[in-house]
Image (tube, grey):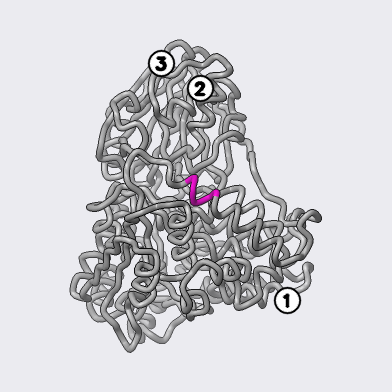
């Protein structure tokens, strides 16, 4: 896990090495263990390293193989790097390190852009071909690792975070109206390729971009599961339980590949508890587990310690509990927003940020249960969508998932900031109507997993953990497990209140009381309820001169929000004031005026 940056020019000029240096410096927290740079001709690359595999300097980056004429920078982990190494050695390749970066380099030499088909893991990488000047960018199948780009008529820059691109300079920081529409429709989510800034884009998940020396490029989408049934497994719950259990075992085992200790973020919910159970089954002793809780606020509990304690005792883990007092939240909130590559509204971002700070003192790699609810239909809004006909799936999705209608959304905005059409509903109709999804639920899960999830929970986890040099791995987003789940009959997911097939597995391996407990989230009551210190921060941001100059929101509407902070809610209950303020606080935190 690391941070990468670079520049490619196609106007005959040399890269701006000072800009690449600034971008690389901005990524220091993602890679505190090492720094490197490389430049040749029209290409310059920078890298910050977090040492997880091959802790020697031989694994440093940018990594060059003079014999192959290739240089690469890489962020992530190739979990099958040892198996791939053996295969590539059998094809005549010779290795000088034990790193997965070198395996990636040799795999590219062997298979070109098709190398991604052989990689199991999470990754974003850039490979430069010395002879041709071609540069190849790629991102993993589920978008676990980020890759941001900005370009003009002369050059392209890329980095592992949006703020790193800002550090390079020359970025159009005006707010993208269509991205703003998405942000206000889907609880802060802006799907790739857009970002909230007009001058910055994201390489979409499961994409390889091949850029020629003249600046022309072509994108290749290399993976998309079919959300249709598998006849060989039928609808027998026992067969599916066995298949999913085996796939999950494999997913967890893969994510223990490291040359440093690996821990688990243990909330005590079904998903993280299953990970602990499977690690115990595989013989992990003395496993470090971590949980965080907050003070109660407005009658809402701020921790799930009884459940995480129960699981820890059952599997004899070395459990670490951290309780946070509410008076720490204002400073923590500012720090979490500063760590965001893009504005996010989910209140648990601050919890992940604070937990990661503590966990990073103990381990450098953690597994967590992110993604299980999307992959196995665990959220309460899925049954209403599933009950809709395939023809009306898009409308059903919008009814339960979209924060507000287009008309209500435009009432919030200054007329100059509002798109003329319902961009978010057009996006939903396009994705939900595409072939390859058999039922309304299949279409909804496909949209959530491949279009929205990379830019909400997955991005949140990456940003908050990497702010402390902590690598987070997500077994439930193993691509083979996702392929299997995509084919699973909807009723085997929706039963028992959702995630039925996982609950069936859990009843066999977890202590009583864990599987059928009420569904929990990562609670931060003071943020969810806009407690006094948080509300003060909100008022300061929205009253700031730059907020008024920006003119995104209708000032009368903002005044109404501030007059009654708890009254205005999105369809799913989120605070409208917090959605509005989060964007402005993020823009100010990153010096965007």
Identify the image quadrant of the C terminus.
bottom left
The answer, for residue 548, to whether it is visible in the render is: no
- Give the residue at mark 2: 106
Going from N to C along the chain, the mark reached first, 1 or 3, is 3
What's drawn in magenta, residue-wise?
250-254
- Quadrant the N terminus occupies: top left
Which marked residue is nearer to the observer: mark 1 or mark 3?
1
- Say which residue label 1 marks: 387
Image quadrant of residue 505? bottom right
Look at the numbered disc 1 and give the secondary structure of its residue.
loop
Residue identifier under label 3 = 41
Q: Give 122 or 317, whichever is nearer the viewer.
A: 317
* Closer to the camera in the image, 572 or 418: 572
How far apart are the two marked residues, 1 and 3, measured between alpha carbons?
58 Å
Q: Are marks 2 and 3 in contact (CB under 8 Å)?
A: no
Picture layout, residue 128 above or below residue 391? above
Q: Is residue 44 above or below residue 421?
A: above
Q: Position of residue 529 (x, y in %)?
A: 34, 81
> Does the CB distance between marks 1 and 3 fall below 8 Å?
no
Do we see residue 106 in this rendering? yes
- In the current view of this chain or complex, which residue is farthest to the left? 327
Task: State the SS at label 2.
Answer: helix
Label 3, residues with CA under 10 Å away: few <14, some 14-19, many ≥20? few
Residue occupying image coordinates x 55% and y 45%: 204
């Amino acid at each position: 896990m690391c941070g990468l940056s670079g520049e490619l020019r196609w106007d005959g000029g040399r890269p701006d090495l000072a800009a690449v240096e600034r971008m690389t410096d901005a990524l220091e927290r993602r890679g505190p263990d090492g720094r490197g740079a490389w430049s040749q001709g029209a290409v310059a690359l920078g890298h910050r390293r977090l040492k997880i595999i091959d802790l020697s300097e031989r694994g440093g980056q940018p990594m060059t193989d003079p014999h192959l004429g290739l240089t690469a920078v890489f962020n992530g982990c190739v979990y099958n790097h040892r198996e791939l190494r053996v295969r590539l050695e059998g094809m005549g390749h010779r290795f000088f390190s034990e790193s997965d970066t070198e395996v990636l380099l040799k795999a590219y030499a062997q298979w070109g852009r098709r190398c991604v088909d052989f990689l199991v893991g999470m990754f974003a990488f850039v490979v430069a071909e010395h002879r041709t000047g071609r540069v190849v960018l790629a991102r993993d199948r589920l978008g676990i690792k980020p890759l941001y780009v900005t370009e003009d008529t002369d050059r392209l820059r890329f980095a592992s975070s949006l703020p790193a691109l800002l550090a390079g300079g020359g970025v159009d920081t005006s707010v993208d109206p269509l991205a703003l529409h998405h942000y206000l429709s889907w609880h802060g989510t802006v799907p790739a390729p857009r970002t909230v800034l007009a001058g910055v884009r994201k390489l979409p998940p499961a994409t390889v971009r091949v850029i020629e020396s003249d600046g022309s490029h072509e994108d290749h989408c290399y993976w998309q599961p079919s959300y249709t049934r598998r006849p060989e497994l039928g609808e027998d719950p026992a067969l599916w339980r066995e298949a999913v259990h085996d796939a999950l075992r494999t997913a967890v085992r893969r994510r223990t590949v490291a040359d440093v200790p690996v821990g688990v973020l243990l909330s005590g919910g079904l998903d993280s508890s299953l990970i602990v159970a499977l690690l115990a089954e595989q013989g992990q002793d003395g496993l470090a587990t971590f949980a965080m809780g907050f003070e109660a606020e407005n009658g809402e509990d701020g921790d799930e310690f009884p459940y995480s304690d129960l699981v820890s005792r059952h599997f004899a883990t070395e459990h670490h509990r951290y309780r946070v007092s509410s008076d720490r939240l204002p400073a923590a909130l500012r720090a979490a927003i500063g760590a965001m590559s893009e504005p996010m509204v989910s209140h648990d971002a601050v919890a992940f940020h604070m937990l990661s700070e503590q966990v990073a003192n103990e381990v450098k790699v953690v597994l967590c249960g992110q993604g299980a609810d999307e992959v196995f239909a665990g959220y309460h809004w899925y049954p209403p969508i599933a009950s809709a006909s395939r023809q009306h799936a898009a409308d059903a999705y919008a009814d339960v998932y979209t924060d507000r209608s287009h008309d209500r959304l435009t009432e919030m905005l200054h007329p100059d900031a509002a798109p003329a059409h319902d961009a978010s509903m057009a996006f939903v109709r396009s994705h939900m109507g595409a072939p390859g999804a058999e039922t309304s639920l299949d279409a909804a899960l496909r949209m959530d997993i491949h279009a929205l999830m990379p830019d909400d929970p997955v991005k949140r986890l990456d940003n908050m953990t990497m702010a402390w040099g902590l690598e987070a791995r997500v077994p439930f987003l193993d691509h083979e497990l996702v392929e299997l789940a995509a084919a699973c009959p909807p009723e085997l997911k929706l039963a028992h209140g959702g995630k039925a097939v996982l609950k069936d597995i859990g009843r066999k391996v977890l202590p009583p009381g864990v599987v059928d407990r009420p569904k929990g989230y990562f609670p931060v009551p003071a943020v969810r309820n806009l407690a006094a210190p948080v509300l003060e921060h909100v008022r300061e941001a929205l009253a700031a001169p730059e907020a008024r100059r920006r003119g995104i929101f209708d000032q009368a509407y903002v005044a109404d929000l501030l007059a009654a902070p708890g009254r205005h809610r999105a369809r799913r209950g989120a605070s409208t004031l917090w959605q509005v303020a989060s964007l402005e606080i993020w823009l100010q935190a990153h010096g965007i005026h």
